[in-house]
Amino acid sequence: MRVMTAIICAGTLLVTGACGGDDEGDEPAGSVPVVEAIDDAPSGEFTLVGLLFDDGGGLVMCDALAESFPPQCPGERVVIANPDAVTADFTEAEGVRWTDSPASLRGTLVDGEFQVAG
């Protein structure tokens, strides 16, 4: 009976986590996800939201990270033109650093690269 209860609880957790919604509302108001920034190239200052990633080739903001270790940035990405202006809580392993949670950076998109304000 305990095994069945554990299986039911685990199944409920998996289903609830998988059906958590469309993640809208998780980002600050007025923010732009990486994919939208690439597709729409907003003009003026805006808040870019995504996961920060640097494998030694320069800091980028990714729409998602692969679940490898260390992770990779396989999808859409925006190059951060002035990485020294970024302060974030990075995880680091094997020469790669990344953020585990989405970061929000305020700035402008110039020639396809994001210039952090400040």
Image: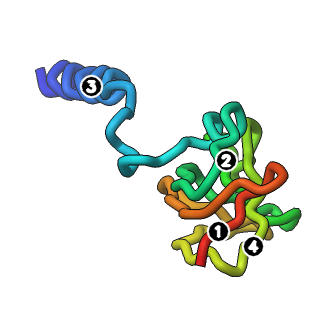
Disc 2, disc 3: CB below 8 Å? no
The reply, left or right, for residue 79 in relation to residue 33 is: right
Distance, label 4 to label 2, CA atoms, is 16 Å
Q: Which residue is mark 1?
A: 116
Between label 3 and label 1, give the one nearer the viewer.
1
Whichever of callouts 3 and 1 sits on the residue coming sooner in the sequence is 3
Residue at 19%, 19% in the rendered image = 4
* Quadrant placement of the N terminus: top left
Between label 3 and label 4, give the one nearer the viewer.
4
Distance, label 3 to label 4, CA atoms, is 39 Å
Front-most of 62 and 110? 110
Please rate how many residues cluster around mark 2, counting C-alpha atoms within 10 Å: few if below 14, some from 14 to 19, many from 20: many
Q: Is residue 27 above or below residue 36?
A: below
Residue at 65%, 48% in the rendered image = 43
Between label 1 and label 2, give the one nearer the viewer.
1
The reply, left or right, for residue 21 in relation to residue 69 is: left
Disc 4, disc 1: CB below 8 Å? yes
Q: Amino acid at mark 4?
A: Asn
- Expressed as whole percent of the image width and height from the top left, the position of residue 81 reads 78, 66
Disc 4, disc 2: CB below 8 Å? no
Which disc, if any, is residue 62?
2
Q: Which residue is mark 4?
A: 82
Q: Which residue is mark 3?
A: 16
Q: Is residue 83 above or below residue 105?
A: below
